[in-house]
Amino acid sequence: MDTVSWAAHRRAVVHTVRRRVPLVDPEVATSRGLAILCARIVADGAVDRPADIWCEAAVDAALAMLRETILAASRRPDPATADDMPGADA
């Protein structure tokens, strides 16, 4: 594959991630998906349909990012309100 094809695939992967998992940064997810593809190529050698593998890995990475965001938000304590303070009903 030439550089122009890879650039076109990147745009398509970013678009797919943005459409399927809209609450995460699609560029970051696309980069993580590319890293996964590269690791697979290093481990297994040549792969069939690398663009499809890249896209699937990027969507999976986006879903993992979304899970991380949700878990982090659930661990954050709620800010105290006046009703939470002792003697607030006085």
Image (cartoon, rainbow, N blue to C red):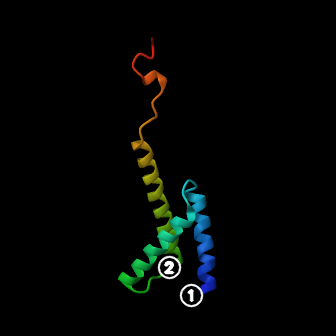
| Residues at circles 1 and 2 in contact by the CB criterion of under 8 Å | yes
- 55 lies left or right of 76: right
Circle 2 residue: 50
Q: Amino acid at mark 2?
A: Pro
Is 60 situated above or below 49? above
Quarter of the picture holding the C terminus: top left
Dividing the picture into quadrants, the one containing residue 26 is: bottom right
Which residue, as the protein is rendered here, is positioned at the far top? 90
**Left or right of residue 61: residue 11:** right
Dot 2, crowdedness within 10 Å: few (<14), some or many (≥20)?
some
User: Earlier along the polypeptide chain: callout 1 or callout 2?
Assistant: 1
Question: In the picture shown, does residue 69 fall above or below 40?
Answer: above
Helix or strand or loop: what does disc 1 sit on?
Answer: loop
Which residue position holds label 1? 1
Residue at position x 39%, y 19% in the image: 86
- Please provide percent x and percent y for residue 64: 44, 58
Residue 53 image point, x, y percent:
48, 74
Which residue in the rendered view is the most extreme toward the left?
A: 43
Image coordinates for residue 55, horizontal then vertical, percent = 52, 70
Query: Which residue is pictured at 60% across the width and 59% down the height?
Result: 19
Residue drawn at point x = 39 percent, y = 86 percent: 45
Query: Residue 51, percent across and down?
Result: 53, 77
Q: Which residue lies at the image location 45% right of the left edge and 45% below the top edge?
A: 73
Mark 1 is on which residue type? Answer: Met
Which of 71/15 is in front?
A: 71
